[in-house]
Amino acid sequence: MAESDSAPSENPEASTESSGVAVLDRAFALLGAFGQDDDALSLAELSRRTGLYKSTVLRLLAALEHGGFVRRLPDGQYAIGPAPLRLATIYQRSFHVGPIVEPLLKQLSSDTGETASFYVRHGEARIAIHRWEPARSVRAAVAVGQQYALHQGASGKVLCAFSSDLRERFAAIRERGWGVSYGEREPDTASVAAPVFAIDGRVQGAIAVSGPRVRLSPPRRC
């Protein structure tokens, strides 16, 4: 008899797949189900977001909890555990830019009164690995570790322009050495970014200043 708690999108035949790759894919799907604003999720919500049976989710959660990747809260909901934080710290440190970039971001944020961030490219996405925010209440929100679209935002366009993407649309950015964005990721925000190069000339990342569009307009202010 089929399980009554199944999510309709799951393929029952695929549920019997026992290969290590399939198990890992499902475990990663569970971790990926947590959004930037999700402090905790219920078993039912995890099942709904992943399309997996609740029984499958429970088995995977037990393994992830044992490894420190998730933790079960007193109310029965699940939250991210400490293991991803340790791995994130290792990932961040692997770029060897923190001691140099962080003081620059702090100074940029202080000088401009806006959010200053350092982005790296990850495939077809960009990730902020360092960030400094101003004290003001209205500011651009940039989440460290969050993947953002590569072809939206000033930092994404800069990363494209100074890497292997030589399309004509980025020629102007390469020529002047910096890029701007008005309302591309969020309608009310704007940003300006410039590349950061390694000692061998390869682009290492992009430093960006972002804030409310009303404060960063007109373009000459950027």
Image (cartoon, rainbow, N blue to C red):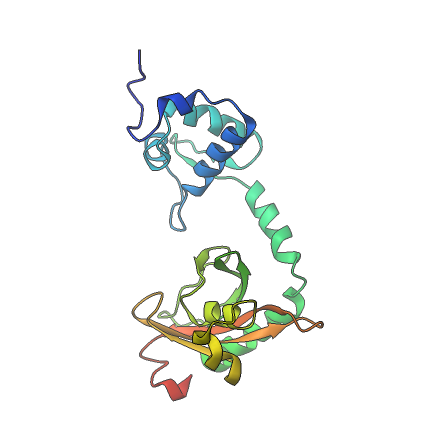
Image quadrant where residue 29 sits: top left
Q: Position of residue 139 (x, y in %)?
A: 38, 70
Q: Position of residue 76 (x, y in %)?
A: 39, 29
Please tell me whether residue 203 is drawn above or below residue 147 in the rendered image.
Answer: below
| In front of the other: 209 or 171 | 171
Q: Is residue 66 above or below residue 201?
A: above
Q: Residue at x 67, y 71 (%)?
A: 198
Judge left or right: residue 2 versus residue 80: left
Residue 217 against residue 136 in the figure, above or below: below
Q: Nearer the viewer, residue 199 or 80?
A: 199
The quadrant holding residue 212 is: bottom left
Q: Residue furthest top?
A: 1
Q: Nearer the viewer, residue 208 or 113?
A: 208
Q: Is residue 210 visible?
A: yes
Q: Residue at x 39, y 21 (%)?
A: 13
Can see residue 79?
no
Estimate the x, y position of residue 22 in percent, counting from the top left.
50, 30
Q: Residue at x 28, y 18 (%)?
A: 4
Q: Where is 219 relative to 50, above or below? A: below
Quadrant where the image shows the C terminus: bottom left
Residue at 56% over, 67% down: 164
Q: Is residue 163 left or right of residue 157?
A: right
Disc tally is 0
* Residue 177 percent coordinates (x, y): 53, 81
